[in-house]
Image (cartoon, grey):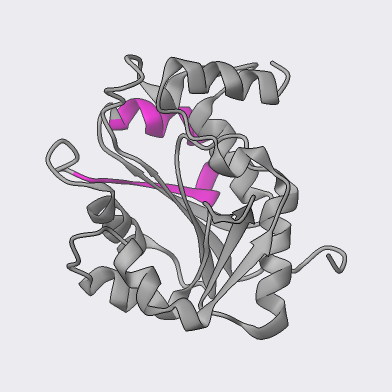
């Protein structure tokens, strides 16, 4: 990487609207040391973004309350149909609420262990040629969080595919860059109690 990439004009869109069914506990507010899962996810994104939009749903008031310490750098927006819609709908609600930006990181709220180096590597790759999409890649597999050019926001808002955003990403493979990383946090979303324990071990909590 070439030093510290500039993150002016960069935002983050974080989706935390789900029901946490497989976990059995409400994932965003699970403790991680002296913070929570959602606070850790947001804090790590804000290391390389000026602001963040967090899409809430289930227990939305509690999530918003947990994030109030970030002040005006974080805006929470509510998906009223969180129980009946998929992640794509929450992404669309969040994309519509993004501030004027050049690009944004997109990640689920239950990915609190993504390394700051990964966010910086994506920004560094974007600076090389302004691709529409920059993905981390671990062990040959494309992972979260992508860095998405704001030019794609209208397409995201209009997208009606049946395969979530994967269909849209496929349509732009020629405008995508994959960045190899060695960060296990890019594949660690907290779907189950076992994932939660792995995350605490990775973060040495």
Q: Is residue 110 above or below residue 175?
A: above
Quarter occupied by the C terminus: top right
The extreme right residue here reads 3
Q: Position of residue 187 (x, y in %)?
A: 55, 41
Please provide the residue range marked out in magenta.
60-79
The image quadrant of residue 200 is: top right
Magenta span dominant secondary structure: helix
Decide if residue 161 is in sight here. Answer: yes
Q: Position of residue 26 (x, y in %)?
A: 35, 20
Q: Is residue 63 magenta?
A: yes
Residue at image location 51% in from the left, 64% down from the top: 104
Q: Position of residue 201 (x, y in %)?
A: 67, 18
Quarter occupied by the N terminus: bottom right
Residue at image location 49% in from the left, 17% down from the top: 194
Residue at image location 57% in from the left, 34% down from the top: 112
Q: Position of residue 44 (x, y in %)?
A: 64, 43
The image quadrant of residue 130 is: bottom right
The image quadrant of residue 199 is: top right
Q: Is residue 135 magenta?
A: no
Q: Of residues 142 and 122, which is closer to you in this image? A: 142
Residue at image location 59% in from the left, 33% down from the top: 40
């Amino acid at each position: 990487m070439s030093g510290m990439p500039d993150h002016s004009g960069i935002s983050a869109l974080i989706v935390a609207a789900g029901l946490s069914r497989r976990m059995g506990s409400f994932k965003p507010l699970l403790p991680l040391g002296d913070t929570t899962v959602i606070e850790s996810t947001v804090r790590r994104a804000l290391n390389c973004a000026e602001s963040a939009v967090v899409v809430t749903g289930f227990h939305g008031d509690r999530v918003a309350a947990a994030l109030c310490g970030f002040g005006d750098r974080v805006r929470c927006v509510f998906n009223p149909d969180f129980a009946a819609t998929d992640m794509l709908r929450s992404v669309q609600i969040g994309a519509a609420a993004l501030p004027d930006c050049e690009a944004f990181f997109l990640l689920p709220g239950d990915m609190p262990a993504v390394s700051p180096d990964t966010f910086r590597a994506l920004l560094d790759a974007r600076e090389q040629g302004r691709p529409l999409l920059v993905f981390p890649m671990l062990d040959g597999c494309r992972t979260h969080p992508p860095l998405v050019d704001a030019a794609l926001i209208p397409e995201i808002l209009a997208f009606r595919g049946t395969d979530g955003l994967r269909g849209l990403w496929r349509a732009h493979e020629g405008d995508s860059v994959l960045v190899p990383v060695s960060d296990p946090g890019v594949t660690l979303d907290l779907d189950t109690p076992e994932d939660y324990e792995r995350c605490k071990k990775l973060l040495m909590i």
